[in-house]
Image: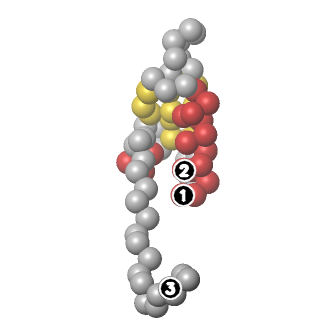
Amino acid sequence: MIDIEHDVPIPEPTVTNNYPFGEMKVGDSFWHSVPHKNLYNAARNYGQRHGKTFTVRSEFAGVPGARVWRVT
């Protein structure tokens, strides 16, 4: 049988962000060596949750990684 417990607090979420999106001001950028699509997805998701806009571009052909700019 499964015991039902009462008044057990929900633990706080432990979210880690590998990228400095929250520290960026409009016009700031950073380069990271992860694949372009990973940076794009992370920037898009963060931007949607926080009302910010980012753009991601590959800088060097054949080199893994991309640069992310905060636009708004």
Look at the picture and state if 30 lies above or below 12. Answer: above
Q: Quadrant of residue 36?
A: top right
Which sits in the foreground, 63 or 51? 63
Q: Position of residue 47 (x, y in %)?
A: 57, 50
Q: Residues within 10 Å of mark 2 (few under 14, many from 20)?
A: some
Q: CA distance from mark 3 to mark 1?
A: 40 Å
Label 1 sits on a secondary structure element that is helix
Label 2 sits on a secondary structure element that is helix
Which residue does the numbered mark 3 point to in the structure image?
3
Find the residue positioned furthest to the top. 62
Q: Quadrant of the N terminus?
A: bottom right
Q: Residue at x 50, y 22 (%)?
A: 65
Amino acid type shown at disc 2: Tyr
Q: Which mark is residue 40?
A: none
Amino acid type shown at disc 3: Asp
Q: CA distance from mark 1 to mark 2?
A: 6 Å
Q: Position of residue 15 (x, y in %)?
A: 43, 56
Tag nearer the camera, 3 or 1: 3
Which sits in the foreground, 46 or 1? 1
Q: Which mark is residue 50?
A: 1
Q: Which mark is residue 46?
A: 2
**Viewer can see residue 39:** yes
Look at the picture and state if 53 lies above or below 9. Answer: above
Q: Is residue 72 left or right of residue 10?
A: right
Q: Residue at x 46, y 91 (%)?
A: 6
Amino acid type shown at disc 1: His
